[in-house]
């Protein structure tokens, strides 16, 4: 009987546990947050936090040493880093004098090229500019930051905007036209024609061994070889049925992503087999037409070429095509003649009508499509841009942009003892993750932030992965935290920059341009802390630690940002003029 009573009591107790509401394990007495949060009546949805708090840590014995410079010169705005002749270099946008007493930065230069000694102990400034210099138009700075930079064993090179071009020509080849009745250079039935075969582009590279001083390379590297539609007996191409009458005064060149061709039209293009009825009206080969094609298309396909008209009012031939070899900014056209064919003595013969000069107008184009009339140009200072049998290559007007990239940028991570390290790039001070996790493990819901936490927030910005970064997921990166007491502070400013490895030690640069996003991050952190506080109050035992961790993480972040707002960002800069930190991880 007694056993039955015990059984009934046990079952009743289990039923009560199952049927009762979730019991709140917390009460306001045990949560003294510095900021009061209102408790919502409804259970909020679980939100995906941003930024996401680190879920895991890896504890290591770490020795951290700041590298202090005597002349108080520090840097900010780090950019590309690269290795040249076994030395590491890094670019810094800004250079400062750092007053350790006031913690103020005074700009002293910009565009610094820095070299890191092989042991990682010293950063040497190779070169920088004065504050008044134009950084974005300084060649070494633009080139070293470019994706097109090529790092070789003995020099660095980069394709310049300057380029040259040459054409493969067929300047004179005969065709027999037994029915033709035009009298040109040769007595019928033999007629000479001409055409272009290819246009080849050569890029001119800039090179440097000092990294600062640059000059044109003696080598010109072929970057494009474009085939031109050849004459076609049955379907006239941009070069006619049999070809142009001559290459004199013709032109084939590259301009702003297009090929441009013009030349002397042949009488055979309008008169089948070169025959014209003697009773027909007068005929002219004058024309205003020229053709262009985008180089991204198949240039050999005649259908891809677009027909345009020159801007002069009347049709012409043998007009002059010029350029300014010093500026290389425009192509000019002017002059030429007009003529017609008359039937005399059994043949159609050419009769000149008019000569044109610059007085009849000079026009220019920068892109091969749009033209404008030039009113004040001195044509005597221009050079020929049309076909010249004695010239192998000619400059490209408007420049030529090489499309392929150069040496890949160095990755931001570094490798040490088979593991990969990176810095967590944040715009807020990293909360003390390890201490917060220990607080959560004790089921405590209050954590007090101090100034010391802010000064050492850089400890928690180092992350490690045993999986190569190109294969690693975000979840594979774990925050490294020291398991030993550290006396030195490490500022948040050293996070986010690229890492280096020297003599089995990791080097982190201090970027004095980095700034906290105080207002937006503070509001975000406060909002997230409030949401997780509400989740915490209504959580089950299984979710308690997760919500407690998120709540304390964002609350600590908000408190740290509040202190920074009250004290000012300058207050938490390094106590010494530190250029970088070395990490000895065991």
Image (cartoon, rainbow, N blue to C red):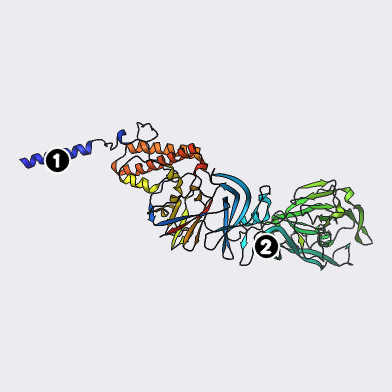
Residue 25 in percent (x, y) is at 28, 38
Give the residue furthest to the right: 345
Q: Count neighbours of disc 2 (C-alpha within 10 A) and say few if under 14, some if 14 to 19, many if 20 or more.
A: many
Residue 176 in percent (x, y) is at 83, 68
Residue 208 in percent (x, y) is at 67, 62
Residue 582 in percent (x, y) is at 48, 57
Location of the C terminus (image quadrant) = bottom left
Measured Cα–Cα span from mark 2 to mark 1: 88 Å
Sequence-wise, which precedes: disc 2 or disc 1? 1
Q: Label 1, on which residue?
A: 10
Residue at 44% of width from left, 52% of height from top?
474
Callout 2: SS: strand
Quarter occupied by residue 276: bottom right
Quarter occupied by residue 418: bottom left
Q: Is residue 543 visible?
A: no
Q: Label 2, on which residue?
A: 207
* 216 in relation to 355, above or below: below
Q: Count neighbours of disc 1 (C-alpha within 10 A) and say few if under 14, some if 14 to 19, many if 20 or more.
A: few
Number of numbered discs on residues: 2
Q: Is residue 168 visible?
A: yes
Camera-nearest residue between 440 and 388:
440
Callout 1: SS: helix
Camera-nearest residue between 47 and 206:
206
């Amino acid at each position: 009987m007694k056993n039955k009573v015990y059984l009934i009591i046990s079952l009743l107790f289990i039923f009560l546990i199952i049927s009762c509401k979730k019991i709140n394990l917390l009460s306001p007495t045990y949560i003294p947050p510095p900021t009061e949060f209102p408790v919502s009546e409804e259970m909020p949805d679980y939100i995906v936090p941003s930024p996401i708090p680190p879920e895991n840590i890896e504890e290591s014995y770490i020795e951290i040493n700041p590298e202090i410079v005597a002349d108080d010169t520090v840097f900010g705005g780090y950019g590309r880093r690269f290795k040249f002749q076994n030395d590491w270099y890094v670019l810094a946008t800004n250079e400062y004098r750092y007053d350790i007493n006031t913690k103020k930065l005074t700009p002293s230069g910009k565009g610094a090229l820095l070299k890191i000694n092989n042991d990682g102990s010293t950063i040497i400034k190779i070169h920088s500019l004065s504050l008044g210099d134009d950084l974005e138009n300084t060649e070494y700075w633009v080139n070293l930051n470019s994706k097109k930079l090529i790092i070789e064993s003995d020099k660095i090179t980069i394709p310049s905007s300057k380029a040259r071009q040459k054409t493969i020509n067929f300047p004179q080849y005969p065709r027999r036209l037994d029915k033709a009745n035009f009298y040109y250079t040769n007595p019928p039935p033999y007629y000479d024609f001409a055409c272009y075969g290819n246009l080849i582009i050569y890029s001119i590279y800039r090179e440097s061994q000092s990294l600062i001083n640059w000059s044109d390379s003696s080598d010109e590297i072929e970057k494009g070889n474009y085939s031109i539609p050849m004459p076609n007996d049955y379907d006239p191409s941009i070069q006619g049925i049999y070809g142009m009458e001559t290459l004199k005064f013709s032109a084939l060149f590259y301009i702003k992503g297009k090929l441009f061709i013009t030349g002397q039209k042949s009488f055979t293009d309008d008169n089948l087999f070169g025959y014209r009825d003697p009773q027909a009206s007068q005929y002219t080969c004058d024309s205003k037409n020229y053709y262009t094609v985008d180089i991204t298309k198949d240039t050999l396909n005649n259908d891809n070429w677009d027909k345009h008209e020159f801007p002069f009012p009347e049709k012409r031939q043998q007009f002059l095509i010029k350029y300014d070899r010093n500026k290389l900014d425009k192509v000019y056209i002017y002059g030429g003649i007009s003529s017609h064919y008359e039937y005399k003595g059994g043949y159609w013969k050419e009769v000149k009508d008019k000569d044109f000069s610059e007085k009849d107008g000079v026009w220019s184009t920068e892109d091969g499509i749009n033209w404008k009339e030039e009113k004040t140009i001195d044509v005597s200072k221009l050079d020929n841009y049309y076909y010249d049998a004695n010239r192998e290559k000619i400059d490209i007007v408007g420049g030529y942009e090489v499309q392929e990239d150069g040496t890949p940028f160095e990755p931001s991570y570094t490798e040490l003892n088979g593991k990969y390290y990176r810095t967590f790039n944040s715009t807020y001070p990293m909360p003390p993750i390890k201490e917060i996790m220990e607080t959560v493990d004790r089921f405590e819901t209050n954590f007090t932030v101090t100034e010391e936490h802010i000064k050492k927030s850089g400890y928690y910005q180092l992350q490690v992965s045993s999986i190569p970064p190109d294969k690693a997921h975000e979840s594979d990166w774990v925050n490294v935290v020291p398991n030993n007491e550290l006396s030195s502070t490490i500022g948040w400013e050293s996070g986010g920059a690229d890492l280096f490895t020297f003599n089995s030690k990791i080097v982190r640069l201090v970027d004095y341009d980095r700034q906290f996003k105080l207002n937006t991050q503070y509001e975000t952190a406060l909002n997230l802390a409030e949401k997780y506080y509400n989740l915490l109050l209504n959580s089950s035992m299984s979710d308690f630690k997760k919500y407690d961790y998120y709540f304390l993480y964002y609350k600590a972040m908000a408190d740290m940002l509040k202190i920074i707002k009250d004290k000012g960002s300058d207050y938490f800069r390094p106590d010494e003029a530190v250029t970088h930190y070395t990490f000895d991880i065991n």
